[in-house]
Image: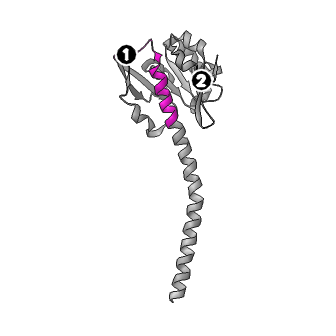
Amino acid sequence: MHAAWLAASAQRRRCCALALALLLPAATRAQAPAAEYAAKAAFIYNIALFSTFPNAQSGLVRLCILGRDPFGKLLAGLEGKPLGEAKMTIAYPHSGRDALKQCQIVFISASESDTVALLAQSARQEGVLTVSDAKGAARSGIMVELDVEDKRIAFEFNAEAARAANIALSSKVLRLARMVY
């Protein structure tokens, strides 16, 4: 009986080891997007630090997430962080129109890719800094397009769109851009 119990115990250990081996790569893959979006959140904050916003209101710079939120709880750490004389706050508007009226920075999620060009044009008129990680966003008129390159955040900048919105980004940041349009 003792031998049977030992054999069953060894079998359970092998099953657990196999399950663990199968789950670890999935856990690592799940952590990769979280780390990517943590870096993107920090990058957005740093861009905000080195930008001027024509529509800043009452000491607040509001970052709005438009569409499906890829950040999850990662933006909570930005709430209340200082931006010069202002503080950052986070909002989740229901529409692009609401985002452009309420916010100084709008992150446009990939789920909104069909409205990127229209949002980019409207953001210029409202003086809103637009950011997205959708491929080709900067060429479509979004001001800052985020990407991951060699495990680091890289970005393209649409200077024409920023000028039209009366948004200035520090030359120190612009030197880091992979491409400026």
In the rendered structure, which amino acid carries the disc numbered 1? Gln
Q: Nearer the viewer, residue 64 or 75?
A: 75
- The reply to whether residue 68 is in sight is no
Reading the image, the residue beneath label 2 is 116
Residue 5, placed above or below residue 67? below
In the image, which residues are magenta? 38-58
Front disc: 2 or 1: 1
The residue located at (51%, 19%) in the rendering is: 129
Across and down, in percent, residue 56 comes to 40, 15
Q: For mark 1, does the 10 Å Cα neighbourhood hold few (<14), some (14 to 19), or many (20 or more) residues?
A: few
Q: Secondary structure at mark 1?
A: loop
Task: Locate residue 84: give its quadrant.
Answer: top left
In the picture, which quadrant includes the C terminus? top right
- The reply to whether residue 100 is in sight is yes
Q: For mark 2, does the 10 Å Cα neighbourhood hold few (<14), some (14 to 19), or many (20 or more) residues?
A: many
> Which label was assigned to residue 57?
1
Q: Nearer the viewer, residue 100 or 135?
A: 135
Q: How is the image coloured?
A: one colour
Q: Secondary structure at mark 2?
A: helix
Is 18 left or right of 52, judged from the image as shown? right
In the rendered structure, which amino acid carries the disc numbered 2? Val
